[in-house]
Amino acid sequence: MKRRPVCLVCLLLMLCLYVTDLAGISMISGNLLPASVQKYISEHLKLTVNGEVQSCQATENSLSVYLKQVFLTVGSEQIPIENIKVYLNKEEQLRIGMVLRVCGKLEEIPGPGNPGEFDSKQYYACQKIYYQMKNGEICGKSAAYSYFGQLLQEIRQKAESILDEAGGAYAGIFQAMILGERGNLDAETKMQYQMAGIMHILAISGLHISFVGMGFFRLLKKAGAGNGVAGAASAFLIYAYGMMTGGSVSAMRAVGMFLVLVGAGIAGRSYDLLSAMALSAIVLLLDAPAYLYSVSFLMSFGAVIGIGAVTPEICSMLNLEKRTEKSLAGSVIVWLITLPIVLRAYGEVSLAGVVLNLLVLPTSGLVLASGIFALPVGIFVIEIAKKVVFPGKCVLFFYEKLCEVVGWIPHSTWIAGSPKLWQCVAYYVMLAVIFAGLKWRKKTAGGKAMRSAASVILVILAVVFLGYHPREGLMIACLDIGQGDCCVLKMPGGENFLIDGGSSNKKNTAVYQILPYLKNQGIATLDGIFVSHTDKDHISGIEEILELCAQNLTTVHVKNLILPDWNTTGEEYERLKMLARQSGIQIQTGREGKLLKTKEVQIEILAPENGADGSDTNEDGMVMEVYFGKFRGLFTGDIGAETEEKLLNSMEDVDFLKVAHHGSKYSTCQKFLDVVRPEIAVISCSAKNTYGHPSADTIKRLEDGGAQVEYTMKSGAITVRTDGERIWLERFTD
């Protein structure tokens, strides 16, 4: 650190930011606006703001506009509120740099409702965006705009259209790699690349920056330009490229390091990779402290440390000289360094990626080069551009087949769950000890093979330690998936079950809520999925999971699908069976009296009754009771008072109740509550719905009966843990 004071400053800055966050000072997480401003915004249905257009993005149903340097108009006062994202209710001709006056309702960017879910709040905080405006209406706009900013926008749009036409089926990948535009990537490609561990090539990185910047620099040098002119021109081009591609953290990190490289060359000074990296990190953190918790930030800088600092040292210690040996060592080291970051964010990591990157990284330059060279050609003759991009398409076809092979290989992805922060710290300490041991080994003679084997064993132990999650008793998690139901059961014996999984007001609940939660908890196998009934708000996510299993697009394995035993089955019921068969999942049916025993927990099915018709899916739904020690938990689907009264004779006092039908006034009747008398009652529904859920009458009946009522719409995922006697409750958003 004495030779690299910038690195020390960077570490101190990161530590200071983390300590201030622990102290409750809002510099990284939370809304940084004064409480009085936040209160004013929340209390007004319509507000007027003024801001400068930073970028525009057309979506399926609206035009998204990012405004910077935004001011909230309150009478004659202008209150700065940083940046906002506006969804306009109609198409507008806008230019970058225009100043807009927009009217609408400001809503705070929502955070995740479940563990493992993507954190939109933190993501936008890195862009200093804390509010969004839906159905915004432009009340005025300036004639002036930024000529340079608009030029970059038009260049980007033209490049996007050229790649769209020339790239064909792979256009979305070319656009992601060259322009940083992931919006046109199909969901299947994203999942395949993530499972294969090569998702990183779809981001603007140092490879892109060095390819474009150094290529332009050398071109100018050959044309007779001096270091100063060539360096300044290259630096300007790279800065403009970084801004044009959206200014992602990986791009701006690479841009910053390239600028330092060029500056060192012009000044005649030596270039130090770690110092340049630290300086880039300092600039990014000072501009937006929220980057400290950004996965992209940590991954990008972690990879640079692995490649630029640790790998050369390890290769020297182990006397690795061959290119393939160094490449493999670099791939493993980057994987090890970024492992805690990946697991904290996603709960899973690709094991195949360590090997695949040896094939992908050397060839991704061909994809990048063919796409970049196709752009100027495509301006004049698009047919020639298609030929120029063809080598890149061949490489992408190769990647596609690699991803398909990975999908078929069992255990190619390790679902380890999200480690605790102390586990991550202990893991890095273990790696540091191993690194120190290797350095000591190099200075001593004898027993090298034994010490090498010991180092490998210690690394394996460190990795296993990171994925260690002891099970203590029974855990029931009621996920926040909007207007719908989804409960996850983690048994003390290692079994895992899903009870329902669907939403009527959220799309792709499996991809965005259910599967991320399972991975966050380290759940790689579902021993069974119980379907209480076949309404969409209970099965839409289950259908997604089964479809993904059939296409080998998820590493979560499902063993059994348990459907209600009905005499008459409808279209949705048969579709679930068909998807299960395609995935090789066993199909079972449940009716009253059926018992499912695990090592320590018993699940008894109380309904539907024998001979149930299934014509009324709600009343004929599956009802289950869970027994663990003295604990009793009841899951009631969407049954109404009619079925509740039929079940009274088989009911008993319970500790936990998943309230029927999202708290409908037609369910959870008084007679039923007089018997079950739950201590904890969880209502799963959306804050905004057209059904009036939950009913005030139902809530009153529950509270009068002594139940502690919890709501997913208020607290996010509700988790109940028990050792069979005592009960603990956790609210995710509290």
Image: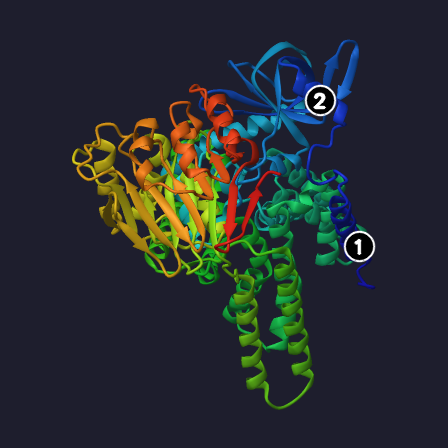
Q: Residue at x 44, y 56 (%)?
A: 629
Mark 1 → mark 2, Cα distance in angstroms: 41 Å
Is 690 situated above or below 115?
above
Residue beneath disc 2: 39
Does residue 173 appear in the picture of this structure? no
Across and down, in percent, residue 157 comes to 52, 28
Q: Is residue 512 left or right of residue 528?
A: right
Label 2 Cα neighbours within 10 Å, binned few <14 / some 14-19 / many ≥20: few
Q: Residue at x 40, y 42 (%)?
A: 634
Across and down, in percent, residue 196 comes to 43, 54
Q: Are marks 1 and 2 in contact (CB under 8 Å)?
A: no
Q: Secondary structure at mark 2?
A: helix
Is 175 situated above or below 433?
above
Is 442 situated above or below 97?
below
Task: For marks 1 and 2, give the one nearer the viewer.
Answer: 2
Q: Which mark is residue 224?
A: none
Report the coloring of the rendering.
Answer: rainbow
Residue beneath disc 1: 6
Does residue 453 appear in the picture of this structure? yes
